[in-house]
Amino acid sequence: MVSLILMKATKQSTADPLFFKVLSTLNESQKRWYVAREAINYGRGGIKITHELTGISRPTIIKGMQELKSKKELQTDMRIRSVGG
């Protein structure tokens, strides 16, 4: 699978515009999982690169990676925030 984040060769971080288009349509949990997956695909330095490209914090990316690696099913049908929150 080819990652949407393109870099390494030039040492300058750039991303496919489609990456940001898709990212803007996702809720918080989905963004965390998507960015975490990109970080995993990139390999070493993936957390740093995805953090710099998206502005999503490193602890959030790490949390997403842990959620993806866990045996528990990802909850997609639940409410993201409480009512009035």
Image (cartoon, helix red, strand yellow):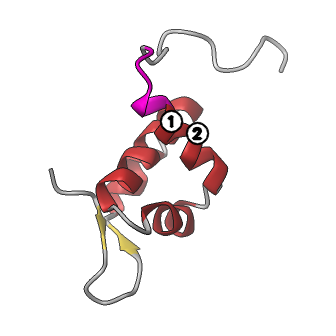
Q: Residue at x 77, y 13 (%)?
A: 82
Count every numbered label the image shows and give the total.
2
Residue stretch rendered in magenta on the structure: 67-72
Q: What is the x, y in percent for residue 21?
A: 39, 51
- Label 2–label 1 contact, CB within 8 A: yes
| Image quadrant assignment for residue 42 | bottom left
Q: Secondary structure at mark 2?
A: helix
Q: What is the x, y in percent for residue 71?
A: 40, 19
Left or right side of 42 for 59: right
Circle 2 residues within 10 Å: few <14, some 14–19, many ≥20: some
Left or right side of 10 for 27: right
**In the depicted structure, whether residue 6 falls above or below residue 57:** below
Between 4 and 38, the residue placed more toward the observer is 38
Residue furthest to the left: 1
Residue furthest to the right: 84
Q: Residue at x 64, y 20 (%)?
A: 80
Q: Residue at x 30, y 80 (%)?
A: 8
Identity, as a three-letter code, of the amino acid under mark 1: Gln
Identity, as a three-letter code, of the amino acid under mark 2: Lys
Q: CA distance from mark 2 to mark 1?
A: 5 Å
Q: Which image quarter holds the C terminus?
A: top right
Q: Confirm whether residue 26 shows in the render.
A: no
**In the depicted structure, whether residue 82 falls above or below residue 68:** above
> Which residue does the numbered mark 2 point to in the structure image?
63
Residue furthest to the bottom: 10
Q: Confirm whether residue 19 shows in the render.
A: yes
Label number found at residue 81: none
> Which residue does the numbered mark 1 point to in the structure image?
66
Q: Secondary structure at mark 1?
A: helix
Q: Residue at x 37, y 87 (%)?
A: 11
